[in-house]
Image: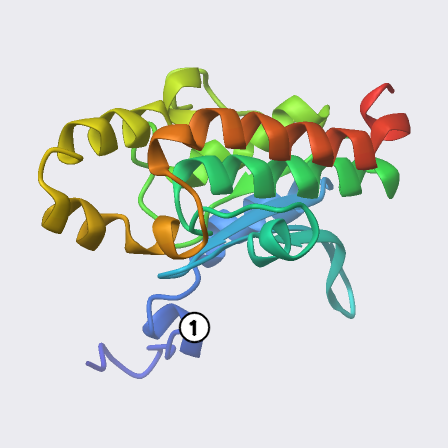
Amino acid sequence: MARGPRYRVPRRRRREGKTNYYKRYRMVLSGKPRIVVCRTLNYIWVQIIKAEETGDKTIAAAHSRELSKHYGWMAPGDNTPAAYLTGLLAGLRALKAGVRQAVPDIGLHRPVRGSRVFAALKGALDAGLSVPVSDEVIPGEDRIRGEHIASWASKLAEEPEKYEHMFSRYLKAGLQPQNLPSHFEEVKNRILEAYREVSKQ
């Protein structure tokens, strides 16, 4: 709605609610790369992006789909453990590319305490990347390992129909959800082993 002869139409992405240009401006002024976390219905995507005059440049990235393709992950790619592992993988790749610090950019995701977005940032932190994020918003170690999922699965196992319905993706991949914490540790070790030299720095 016009407000007079000096009214300026906001940029398209601002009108669509896709970009907060004030926050983006502050992040660009920091001069540091951004660690961008995107979450879809089935996957988590973490990118290390640097703003340049010609546009944003992706320095390193990781997609939760890679976990199953290259590291034997059998659980869904959108849960908290998968978010952590994707952040860990992205962080190790960023270190390999020479990036040591990054500022968090969670886009339009609400900053909910203990959410998958912060699990991904925790993964990048554990990789050795310096990311300014409060410990208060990071999910606990039990949630990162998927112990809450395993506990719920154990309780639901007494009702076979609900159990098979709720955990169909786990069972189809050949993973008992009760074994998720140990499976998480196996995949985490595979990732660290693949980037052993980087993780020692």
Q: Position of residue 153 (x, y in %)?
A: 24, 33
Asked whether residue 29 is in view, the answer is yes
Element assignment for label 1: helix
Amino acid found under the numbered disc labelled 1 = Arg
Identify which residue is drawn at 52% across, 32% down: 183
Judge the density around disc 1: few (<14), some (14-19), many (≥20) Cα neighbours within 10 Å: few
Residue 149, image quadrant: top left
Residue 136, image quadrant: top left
Identify which residue is drawn at 59% across, 53% down: 68
| Count of number-bearing discs | 1
Judge left or right: residue 156 versus residue 146. left
Judge left or right: residue 109 versus residue 61. left
Q: Position of residue 89 (x, y in %)?
A: 68, 40
Q: Position of residue 36 (x, y in %)?
A: 57, 49
Query: In the figure, 156 relative to 141: above or below?
Result: below
Identify which residue is drawn at 57% across, 25% down: 185
Residue closer to the observer: 194 or 72 = 72
Q: Position of residue 8 (x, y in %)?
A: 38, 77
The quadrant in which the C terminus is found is: top right
Judge left or right: residue 30 versus residue 59. left
Which residue is under mark 1? 13
Residue closer to the observer: 120 or 69 = 69
Query: In the figure, 200 relative to 17: above or below?
Result: above
Query: In the figure, 120 relative to 108: above or below?
Result: above
Residue closer to the observer: 96 or 98 = 96
